[in-house]
Amino acid sequence: MNSLKEKVSAYLKRLTTFKKQLDSQFEAVEIIGNDIGAFIYIKHQNRAVELSELRNREIWIEFWEEQSEDDHYQDCHTPVAEITLKKYDDASKILKDWLIKRSDLKGYITVEWNKE
């Protein structure tokens, strides 16, 4: 059985590999945090995404939008929805739909926030 240190190392390697695939496509792509608490933060066109893995290696993504055009804080975002996926390829498609194509996530989301 793999030790915790080996599992964390493998997780960070998966995050780094996925980050490299995204680097040239978005305004900002960075790994934030350390060890098992690390996640990828991606920002593009007033939207953002945080991506990490759950213990069962499912991919958890949280989608964020800028609160308003009048925000005085460049990175002031509000969570909009979250989704859990099995594959990084699926995550890549949904990230591009949300951040580049500006889709509304219909058909993708598992939890939607701030519904009025």
Image: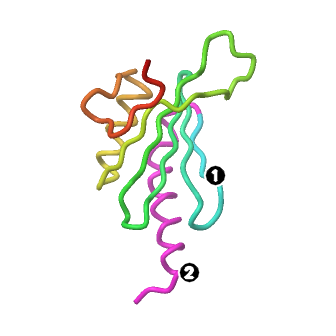
Name the residue beneath numbered marker 2. Answer: 5
* Residue 43, above or below 31: above
Q: Amino acid at mark 2?
A: Lys
Tag 1: residue type? Ile
Which residue is rendered at x = 48% and y = 76% of the image? 7
Write the start and end of the magenta stretch as one range: 1-27
84 vs 116, nearest the viewer: 116
Task: Give whichever of discs 2 and 1 has the lower sequence position.
Answer: 2
User: Quadrant location of the C terminus?
Assistant: top left
Tag on residue 32? 1
Left or right relative to 6: residue 60: left
The image position of residue 30, as x and y in percent, is 60, 46
At mark 1, the secondary structure is strand
Residue 57 percent location from the top left of the image: 38, 64
Give the left or right position of residue 24, taking residue 70 as reference. left
Give the image's coloring scheme.
rainbow
Q: Is disc 2 in contact with disc 1, using a CB cutoff of under 8 Å?
A: no
